């Protein structure tokens, strides 16, 4: 991540790995950003920065089952596109849970940015009914009125709906009405409203969250419209000829903000291609400077697109971009590090940390497998670099059909697993690759000990797996990143690659797997 070759520049993404649909708010010289989390738990990771370039996670907005129910979430379902705002010393995070039985859109509040956040306030229309659509946003007007907006539909198609809202009850004060259908590109979504110099600016994403993604903007002197589109829309797109061959693609879903020194910026997501037009790390968070032209329209990064090297400005001109630190965990704490995620709501009786000897985490497998849209016993972190390595130490003496190990995971239909299990009374280890409707199992190596060191080395194009046990190294094989890419999937996937520990078992009394060490390290090249 560190960029020292060119002065006064930084390298995008500023937050690498699956951190998509970013929303940002400022409290003095402190900046806070929230992101989509879909079917992963806890929900809505929250980051903090003082310089816009170096970010650190401080909490999750949705950290309890009462705030976040994901039991019925299918792949890329659940929490969509949060908006984070600060008003009257209170932080508001509004989002959608597309699989909740209580409603769709809701917001939570906190007096401190890191929380804890309140129980959800569910949003209803003026008649008390749940509201469809995604990507909700709140705008606090100068006169004290508060406006809710989200994706909505009318006879002309998809657009941006808006209505005044009662924040005490979550009920809209009026019918939701569409104020802009966008520029004519597909899927107008991700609305945010800003008041700048007497103009109400409405910023949206269009084109779908792939290679046609873009940021468009319109404005009006009246919050209710009509909205005049910017004459040089899209204000951000990677479709310009000068950038089509670059590593960063699919930029969109932006949130505009003014820094404490008066400079303007846009935070967006995009993805980095691994090879050709493939990407597997997910949509990552990018940052670009913004200026204003003579007609008071925003100009993004001077040329309307994002390169890997981006100019700094204002008080941030001398910021040094730091490397993303490596991550090591021996699970000696009684709380999990914030980098860890579960797949849907976990059953905590299947997780024990720290273990009895004060180190390690014990996973007790259930019948839920990695191939199902359920909640397996699974503990993962985001892959944040193309070139990286993982080392895991595990003690496990499985009974027949007990299984535990390590998975490079995208979806139930796309993952690579290093599995340890028992067959015919013998402990075996092997590589399994699940790609769509094909499942391949490599040679099963007989293990003569119950302790294992699992190793994974990743490059831009492949993953390489091995296991060390009883003083011997067993090379299990490799898998292409291509087959874990969004472009290789039957349905579009909105998340990114996770590196996870797991345990499964159909047995009524499964043997626990004891993981004593996990290390993730970035690398320049393998």
Image (cartoon, rainbow, N blue to C red):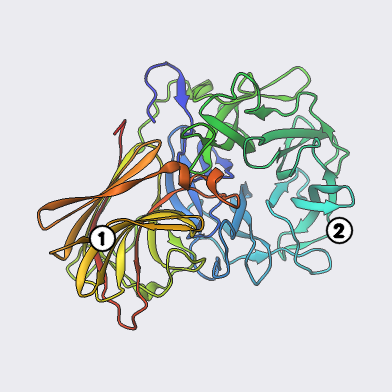
| Circle 1 SS class | loop
Pointer 2 residue: 175
Compared across the picture, whether 386 is left or right of 265 comes to left
In the depicted structure, whether residue 6 falls above or below residue 393: above
Left or right: 125 with respect to 498? right
Q: CA distance from mark 2 to mark 1?
A: 62 Å
Residue depicted at 43% across the width and 63% down the height: 370
Q: Nearer the viewer, residue 324 or 473?
A: 473
Q: Quadrant of the C terminus?
A: top left
Mark 1 closeness class: few <14, some 14–19, many ≥20 residues within 10 Å: some
Q: Is residue 351 above or below residue 492?
A: below
Q: Is residue 219 left or right of residue 471?
A: right
Circle 1 residue: 444
- Quadrant including the N terminus: top left
Q: How many marks?
A: 2
Picture quarter containing residue 252? top right
Mark identifier at residue 432: none
Q: Is residue 260 visible?
A: no
* Percent position of residue 272, x then y: 50, 34
Residue drawn where x is 27% and y is 73% of the image: 512
Residue 300 placement (x, y as % from top left): 64, 25
Q: Is residue 69 above or below residue 94?
A: below
Percent x, y for residue 412? 48, 60
Residue 499 left/right relative to 19: left
**Helix, strand or loop for disc 2:** loop
Query: What residue is rendered at 58% in x and 69% in y?
Result: 72
Which of the two labelled residues, at mark 2 and mark 1, occupies the earlier sequence position?
A: 2
């Amino acid at each position: 991540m560190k960029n020292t070759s060119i002065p006064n520049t930084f390298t995008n993404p500023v937050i690498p790995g699956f951190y998509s649909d970013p929303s940002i708010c400022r409290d003095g010289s402190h900046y806070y950003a929230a992101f989509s989390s879909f079917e992963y738990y806890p929900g809505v990771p929250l980051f903090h920065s003082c310089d816009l370039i170096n970010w650190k996670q401080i909490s999750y907005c949705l950290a309890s089952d009462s705030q976040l129910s994901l039991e019925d979430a299918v792949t890329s379902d659940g929490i969509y596109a949060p908006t984070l705002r600060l008003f009257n010393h209170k932080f508001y995070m509004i989002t959608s849970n597309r699989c909740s039985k209580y409603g769709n859109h809701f917001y939570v509040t906190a007096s401190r940015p890191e929380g804890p956040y309140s129980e959800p306030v569910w949003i209803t229309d003026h008649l008390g009914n749940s509201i469809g659509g995604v990507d909700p946003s709140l705008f606090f007007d100068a006169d004290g009125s508060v406006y809710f907006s989200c994706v909505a539909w009318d006879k002309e198609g998809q657009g941006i709906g808006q209505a005044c809202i009662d924040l005490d009850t979550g009920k809209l004060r009026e019918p939701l009405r569409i104020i802009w259908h966008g520029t004519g590109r597909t899927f107008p979504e991700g609305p945010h409203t800003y008041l700048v110099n007497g103009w109400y600016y409405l910023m949206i994403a269009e084109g779908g969250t792939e290679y046609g993604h873009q940021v468009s903007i319109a404005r009006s002197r009246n919050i209710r419209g009509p909205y005049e589109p910017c004459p040089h829309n899209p204000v951000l797109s990677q479709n310009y000829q000068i950038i089509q061959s670059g590593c960063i693609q699919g930029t969109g879903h932006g949130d505009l903000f003014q820094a404490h020194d008066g400079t303007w910026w846009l935070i967006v997501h995009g993805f980095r291609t691994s090879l050709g037009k493939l990407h597997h790390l997910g949509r990552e968070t990018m940052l670009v400077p913004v200026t204003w032209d003579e007609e008071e329209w925003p100009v993004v990064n001077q040329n309307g697109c994002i390169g890997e090297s981006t100019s700094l400005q204002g008080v941030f001109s001398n910021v040094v971009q730091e490397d993303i630190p490596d991550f090591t965990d021996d699970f000696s704490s009684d709380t999990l590090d914030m980098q860890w995620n579960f797949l849907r709501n976990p059953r905590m009786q299947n997780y024990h940390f720290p273990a009895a000897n004060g180190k390690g985490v014990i996973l007790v497998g259930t019948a839920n497998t990695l191939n199902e849209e359920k909640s397996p016993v699974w503990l993962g972190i985001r892959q944040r670099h193309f070139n990286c390595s993982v080392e895991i130490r595990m003690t496990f003496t499985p009974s027949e059909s007990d299984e535990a190990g390590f998975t490079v995971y995208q979806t139930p239909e796309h993952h690579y697993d290093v599995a340890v299990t028992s067959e015919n009374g013998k402990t075996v280890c092997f590589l399994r690759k699940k790609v769509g409707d094909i499942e391949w199992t490599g040679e099963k190596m007989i293990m003569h000990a119950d302790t294992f060191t699992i190793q994974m080395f990743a490059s831009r194009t492949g993953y390489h797996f091995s296991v060390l046990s009883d003083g011997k190294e067993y090379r299990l094989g490799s898998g292409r990143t291509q087959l874990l890419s969004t472009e290789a999937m039957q349905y579009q996937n909105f998340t990114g690659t996770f590196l996870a520990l797991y345990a499964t078992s159909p047995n009524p009394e499964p043997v626990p797997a004891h993981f004593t060490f996990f290390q993730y390290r970035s690398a320049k090249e393998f």
